[in-house]
């Protein structure tokens, strides 16, 4: 608040000189002069000044400042968000602000308000974590090493860190990668170490756990989501303000675990983890000055009972694959073909690939389950998935395939018929036959017929062989059998009778 009332009092009531007033109030001579000029211009008297409040006095002396205070405030959240977009400046945002509010703040004040908001934005509430509520997980930027005993090759491995929110009980382990199988296995062992399940898993937004990183709507990786369902918890990707907990835990793991083994050499991942877990016992038993108790004591007293019990079975890692059902009602998974009910032809499905079993899901319904096979190009077919004898709805039949092949030529039809005859179920040959017929669009039906003829001669009965013949131009080259049967009769050949 300006010293206007005191300046007016000393001048109009006491009659003091301008310089004496300036020295007494602690302002410049110019401020004294301008204040008295404004008071006279406003038609004030000392009696009038005594009868009004300080705010009213300031409004009368400085009407422009009062009007400035009534101008609409800028939306600082909007300014901050827009500034992150390419080429957007504060000057442009001020111009857009004035378009919406013609009587708005001038540019300097506009910038001052935004900078003041930025300064206040750093003040955040202390995060309080309820017992059993969350476990925070991340990988350390500093990594331990494993040395091959035979070759001396050094391999940097990953350090997984998990910490409970309330007690700070910490779990660590080394793994070769951050990829899905290692990521999931580390979670399983961490939950078993804690002896229970928290209300939420809070990972940093790395690809193993979050397929699409986003501040507001991150997408969780499918297998990670299924792990959460198996253990009866949920995944809540970390917000920037949530990361302090695990970042501190990572820092402590680096200082109290990695630093202590800096001069030790480990020839296997198992040996490294055995040493880390040995040191982890000491870390969780250390008394924390802030709490006066160790992590283990706090866990046993306040958090262990708050965790949900572990399920009866361990979660096993699975991969997910999106696919479309082919016309032979099979789905290709890692090169092997698994059957699904024939009514799902052309439908989009998901394959859940476990260690021993491959499950096919249509939506959220499991429509097929097969023992996993690693034989590429082979078929696993269940009889109940095949169409019934009448095939009233079936669009593709062996006769239709052979009819199409016959339009190209006899050799093409014969080759397709041979392919269908060799399969345990004719439908398993549909894929190869259709692939061969499509080659006619690329190379022409004349060349396709020649290639099929050559394939029949050399007993090559697959799509790959026909494609190779066409790609290498072998359909234009005679086979050995054809070369030996060529006639030697020619008008330029004299023959033996010529010499008699």
Image (cartoon, helix red, strand yellow):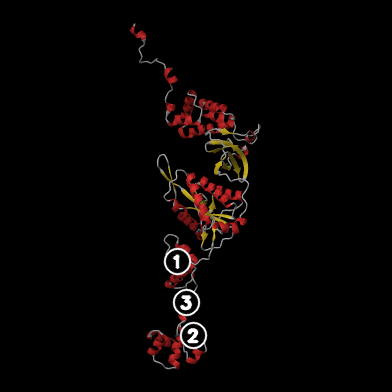
Task: Answer few, some or many: residues within 10 Å of disc 1's Cα (few below 14, many 20 plus, some between 14 and 19).
Answer: some
The quarter of the rendered structure image containing the C terminus is top left
Q: Earlier in the sequence, mark 1 or mark 2?
A: 2
Pick the front one: 211 or 234: 234
The correct choice, above or below, for 65 with respect to 256 in the image is below
In this view, the residue in front, 43 or 201, is 201
Quadrant in the rendering for residue 135: bottom right
| Residue 140 vertical position relative to residue 408 in the rendered view, above or below | below
Calculate the distance from the C-alpha at mark 2 to the C-alpha at mark 3.
16 Å
Residue plotted at (48% across, 34% down): 441
Q: CA distance from mark 1 to mark 3?
A: 19 Å
Residue 331 image position (x, y, % from top left)? 56, 38
**Residue located farthest toward the left when viewing the structure as drawn:** 499
Q: Mark 2, residues whose alpha carbon is within 10 Å: few (<14), some, or many (≥20)?
A: many
Q: Residue furthest top?
A: 500
Label 2 or label 3, whichever lies nearer to me, is: 2
Residue 130 against residue 23 in the figure, above or below: above
- Mark 3 burial class by Cα count in 10 Å: few <14, some 14-19, many 20+: some
SS for callout 3: helix
Q: Position of residue 288 (x, y in %)?
A: 52, 61
Q: In the rendered image, which residue does mark 2 sit on?
A: 57
For marks 1 and 3 on the same chain, the one whose residue lies earlier in the sequence:
3
Q: Is residue 295 left or right of residue 388?
A: left
Q: Nearer the viewer, mark 1 or mark 2?
A: 2
Residue 39 seen in the figure: no
Q: Position of residue 24 (x, y in %)?
A: 41, 88
The secondary structure type at the circle numbered 2 is helix
In three-dimensional space, the C-alpha distance between marks 1 and 2, rounded to whole angstroms, equals 35 Å
Secondary structure, mark 1, is helix
Which residue is located at x 42 percent, y 26 percent? 476
Residue to which mark 3 is pinned: 68
Q: Which mark is residue 93?
A: 1
């Amino acid at each position: 608040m300006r010293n206007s009332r005191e300046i007016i009092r000393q001048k109009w009531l006491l009659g003091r000189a301008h310089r004496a007033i300036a020295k007494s109030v602690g302002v410049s001579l110019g401020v004294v002069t301008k204040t008295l000029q404004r008071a006279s211009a406003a038609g004030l008297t000392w009696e009038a000044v005594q009868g009004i409040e300080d705010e009213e006095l300031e409004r009368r002396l400085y009407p422009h400042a009062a009007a400035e205070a009534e101008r609409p405030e800028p939306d600082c959240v909007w300014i901050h968000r827009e500034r992150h977009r390419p080429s957007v400046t504060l000057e442009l945002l001020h111009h857009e602000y004035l378009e919406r509010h013609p009587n708005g703040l001038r540019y300097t004040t506009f910038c001052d308000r935004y900078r003041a908001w930025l300064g206040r934005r750093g003040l955040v509430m202390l995060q309080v974590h309820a017992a059993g509520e969350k476990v925070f997980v991340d990988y350390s930027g500093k990594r331990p090493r494993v040395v091959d005993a035979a070759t001396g090759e050094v391999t940097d491995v990953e350090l997984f860190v998990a910490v409970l929110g309330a007690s700070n009980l910490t779990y660590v382990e080394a793994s070769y990668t951050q990829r899905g199988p290692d990521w999931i296995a580390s979670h399983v062992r961490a939950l078993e170490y804690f002896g229970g399940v928290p209300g939420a898993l809070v990972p940093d937004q790395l690809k193993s756990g979050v397929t699409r990183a986003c501040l507001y709507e991150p997408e969780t990786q499918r297998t990670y989501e299924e792990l959460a369902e198996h253990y009866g918890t949920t995944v809540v990707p970390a917000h920037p303000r949530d990361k302090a907990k695990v970042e501190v835990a990572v820092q402590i793991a680096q200082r109290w675990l990695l630093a202590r083994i800096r001069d030790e050499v480990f020839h296997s991942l198992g040996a490294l983890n055995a040493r880390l877990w040995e040191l982890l016992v000491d870390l969780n038993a250390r008394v924390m000055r802030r709490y006066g108790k160790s992590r283990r004591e706090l866990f046993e007293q306040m958090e262990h009972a708050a965790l949900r019990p572990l399920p009866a079975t361990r979660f096993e890692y699975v991969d997910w694959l999106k696919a479309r059902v082919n016309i032979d009602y099979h789905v290709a998974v890692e090169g092997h073909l698994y059957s699904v009910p024939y009514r799902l032809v052309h439908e989009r499905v998901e394959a859940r690939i476990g260690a021993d079993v491959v499950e096919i899901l249509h939506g959220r319904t499991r429509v097929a389950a097969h023992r996993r096979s690693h034989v590429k190009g082979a078929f696993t077919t269940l009889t109940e998935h095949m169409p019934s004898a009448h095939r009233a709805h079936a669009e593709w039949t062996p006769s239709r395939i052979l009819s199409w092949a016959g339009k190209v030529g006899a050799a093409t039809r014969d080759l397709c018929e041979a392919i269908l005859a060799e399969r345990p179920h004719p439908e398993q040959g549909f894929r190869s036959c259709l692939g061969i017929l499509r080659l006619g669009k690329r190379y022409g039906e004349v060349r396709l017929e020649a290639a099929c003829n050559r394939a029949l001669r050399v007993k090559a009965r697959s799509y790959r062989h026909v494609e190779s013949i066409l790609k290498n131009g072998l359909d234009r080259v005679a086979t050995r059998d054809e070369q030996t049967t060529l006639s030697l009769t020619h008008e330029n050949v004299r023959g033996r009778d010529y010499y008699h």
